[in-house]
Image (cartoon, rainbow, N blue to C red):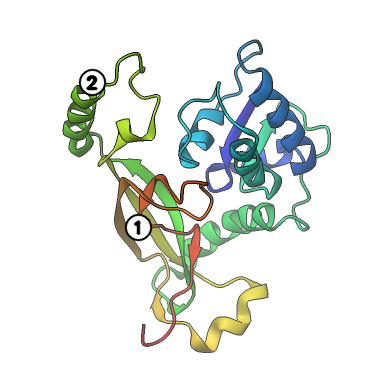
């Protein structure tokens, strides 16, 4: 069994089964080229949607490279029953952050009343199903004018849907101590929520100069500086 998972959603017990990005990239590349005929790898469709791609059977080389870049970096991790070569928890940035996240979660249980420098880290992403249902209905009706096109095969079918991103204030890692003096101060464990909307907007990745993606853009981890 293989599952492709965003690094922030990898569970502690899965970390030892994460494949090295070099081999993961090769596996996903071959899967994208032959997905009509091979067993499904769960999570690939989620990565494609994050990249604004909704027709997995008709990807060009540039689109495939865009998808694979997120696997090669370790941002998206391939979990197997037994990894051929487990990911380097110290050498890969995302794997290291993933490992540190579990230590941070334990740490927050003891310092949740403490304030200090830190960063905002995504801990949860939820689609606003009720609020998005009206947008889906409107998009479905609009798609009926596109003769021969399957609904949900294009980014515009998800237009104006919304989701809520939850960020939590967590301590800086050892390698981030240089930011301590300039960091804003918040209570560790404090959370705030950001509502994103799916729209067509400028995108440096896309040949046409625009693509469908979530706005405002929210990074996995964000620093907040004093006075900002």
Q: In this rendered view, identify the residue nearer to me: 118 or 6.
A: 6
Q: Which dot marks residue 26?
A: none
Residue 77: x and y, percent?
Answer: 64, 40
Q: In this rendered view, identify the residue nearer to me: 84 or 202.
A: 202
Residue 96: x and y, percent?
Answer: 68, 57
Q: In this rendered view, identify the residue nearer to me: 81 or 27.
A: 27
Is residue 88 positioned above or below 222 on the image?
above
Point 61% across, 13% down: residue: 36
Q: Residue furthest right?
A: 85
Name the element at disc 1.
loop
Mark 1 residue crowding within 10 angstroms, few (<14) / some (14–19) / many (20+): few
Point 31% across, 57% down: residue: 194
Q: Is residue 61 left or right of residue 187?
A: right
| Disc 1 target residue | 216
| Disc 2 target residue | 145
Name the element at disc 2.
loop
Q: In this rendered view, identify the residue nearer to me: 86 or 6.
A: 6
Residue 56: x and y, percent?
Answer: 53, 25
* Residue 12 falls in image quadrant: top right
């Amino acid at each position: 069994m293989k599952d492709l998972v965003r690094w922030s959603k990898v569970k502690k017990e899965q970390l030892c089964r994460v494949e090295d990005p070099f081999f993961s990239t090769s596996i996903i590349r071959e899967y994208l080229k032959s997905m009509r005929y091979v067993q499904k790898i769960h999570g690939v469709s989620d990565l494609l949607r994050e990249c604004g791609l909704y027709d997995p059977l008709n990807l060009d080389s540039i689109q495939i490279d865009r998808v694979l870049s997120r696997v090669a970096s370790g941002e998206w991790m391939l979990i197997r029953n037994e990894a051929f070569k487990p990911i380097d928890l110290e050498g890969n940035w995302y794997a290291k952050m993933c490992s540190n996240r579990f230590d941070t979660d334990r740490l927050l249980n003891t310092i949740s009343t403490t304030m200090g420098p830190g960063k905002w880290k995504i801990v949860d992403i939820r689609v606003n199903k009720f609020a998005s249902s009206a947008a889906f209905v409107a998009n479905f009706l609009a798609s009926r004018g596109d003769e021969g096109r399957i609904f949900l095969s294009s980014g515009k079918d998800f237009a104006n849907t919304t989701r809520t991103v939850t960020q939590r204030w967590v301590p800086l890692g050892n390698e981030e101590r240089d930011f301590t003096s300039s960091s804003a101060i918040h209570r560790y464990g404090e959370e705030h929520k950001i509502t994103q909307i799916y729209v067509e907007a400028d995108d440096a990745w896309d040949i046409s100069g625009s693509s469908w993606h979530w706005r405002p853009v929210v990074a996995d981890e964000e620093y907040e500086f004093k006075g900002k």
